[in-house]
Image (cartoon, rainbow, N blue to C red):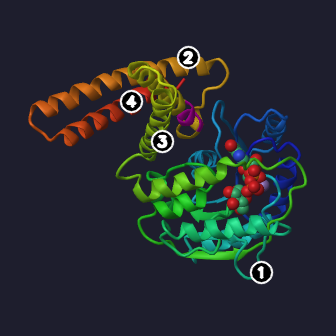
Amino acid sequence: MPTFNERENVAELARRIDIVLSNVSYEIIYVDDDSRDGTLQVLREMAESDARIRLVHRIGRRGLSSAVVEGIQSSAAPCFAVIDADLQHDETLLSAMFEAISADKADLVVGSRYVSGGGVGDWSKSRQLVSRFATWMSGLVLKAHLGDPMSGYFAMNRSTFDEAARRLSQQGYKILLDVVASLPTAPRVLELPYVFSARVHGESKLDSAVTWEYLLLLADKLVGHIVPVRFLMFIAVGGAGVFVHMAVLAFLFRGIGQAFIEAQTIAMIAAMTFNYFVNNFLTYRDRRQKGWKIVYGLISFYAVCSFGAIANVGIANFAFGYEYSWWLAGLAGILVGAVWNYAASSVVTWGAK
Ligand code: GDD
Ligand code: MN
């Protein structure tokens, strides 16, 4: 059970699960990303009085998917289920889920909002539409048909999970999709309907980043084995930076008649600055620099890119000297410069703490 600021919900759900699973020997593992609302204290008290309740406390990390994976890995149970801690997933399905897995009727049981009998409660039309569209897109990467691949509520046998474990992206929120897209063969799936209920306590942690992270997960599943998605984003941002460069250059040189060398220098700084901020916002959103760190980040990014420019010109000149055509030499310079900028900035500018 992943938790982040769920003080009011965790004990109630544990109490309900104990009723639902009264005939099953089970443990509950909470993976909490350092909640500051008192959830941790509540979980510790629960764990102290009941040995079947455990807590994995992560500091300095966030993420629903990675939390879920860590919880699964911290247990040796042959069958496990993932459920939200906020009472929005119908816990009464857990016994039927366990039943199906332990009797080997399925490898995966999904609590589904989109099979007959299921539903999303009082979602707005637009949210339903977005959810449907995202579901359709998931067909691009899935190995098996799932009515509700976005579901965060499912049960699995461990051997199935193990087949996917080393290929998981662990990006964002969609852990079920990640697991099923990472399996070498289609699992036997059973879908059980449930109605997604409204939240009573606390608030949802899904924000606008969730769409972005979802697209990254799909991209990673589609091409991630060939080239890292982060690198592709870095290149795309660099491409946009070329337009910024040319616009500033045109304005300064053609527009207001600045000397070319000055105009070009300012355009270059503008493009680097643009690239830094967009990369900081999107490409490295998980290591985003804030406050004063932005100054350090920007300066180090300038430094990295300056070496990149030197490498770019050097390689291009070298290739040109070997009688490669001018454009091939130019592209070789750009490629080497870009790879350098990516590799060096990932360590120097956005290096792990
Ligand atoms: N450890 C940890 N770290 N837990 C988190 C984090 C995090 O960064 N973000 C959210 N959680 C926990 C919440 O505390 C809650 O228990 C659960 O994950 C779901 O988070 P919500 O923010 O309530 O998500 P939701 O209700 O909008 O959507 C959920 O249900 C959908 C339908 O099954 C998610 O599970 C979606 O992925 C899912 O599509
Ligand atoms: Mn929720």
Comes first in the chain, label 2 or label 4: 2
Asked whether the residues under the numbered discs 2 and 3 touch, taking CB atoms below 8 Å apart as contact, a structural biologist would say: no
User: Is 278 inside the magenta-drawn segment?
Assistant: yes
Nearer the observer, disc 3 or disc 1? Answer: 3
For this view, does 136 lie left or right of residue 112? left
Q: Give the distance between the C-alpha atoms of the residues marked 2 and 3, in whole angstroms.
A: 23 Å
What's the amino acid at mark 2?
Answer: Tyr
Q: Which residue is mark 2?
A: 296
Q: Quadrant of the C terminus?
A: top right
Badge 1 local density, few (<14 within 10 Å), some, or many (20+)? few
Nearer the observer, disc 2 or disc 1? Answer: 2
User: Where residue 140 sits: x, y (%)?
Assistant: 49, 68
Q: Give the distance between the C-alpha atoms of the residues marked 3 and 1, in whole angstroms.
A: 47 Å
Dividing the picture into quarters, in which one does residue 125 lie? bottom right
Q: Is residue 64 above or below residue 87?
A: above
User: Where residue 1 sits: x, y (%)?
Assistant: 71, 51
The residue drawn where x is 75% and y is 47% is: 205
Using the image, tell me which numbered label, if any, was put on residue 240: 3
For label 4, the SS is helix
What's the amino acid at mark 1?
Answer: Gly
Q: Give the distance between the C-alpha atoms of the residues marked 4 and 3, in whole angstroms.
A: 15 Å
- Magenta-colored span: 277-281
For this view, does 124 lie left or right of residue 307? right
What's the amino acid at mark 4?
Answer: Asn
Ligand 2 falls in quadrant? bottom right
User: Is the shortest distance between ligand 1 and the CB of mark 3 under 8 Å?
Assistant: no
For label 2, the SS is helix
Q: Which residue is mark 1?
A: 117
Comes first in the chain, label 2 or label 1: 1
Answer yes or no: is residue 83 visible: no
User: Is the shortest distance between ligand 1 and the CB of mark 1 under 8 Å?
Assistant: no
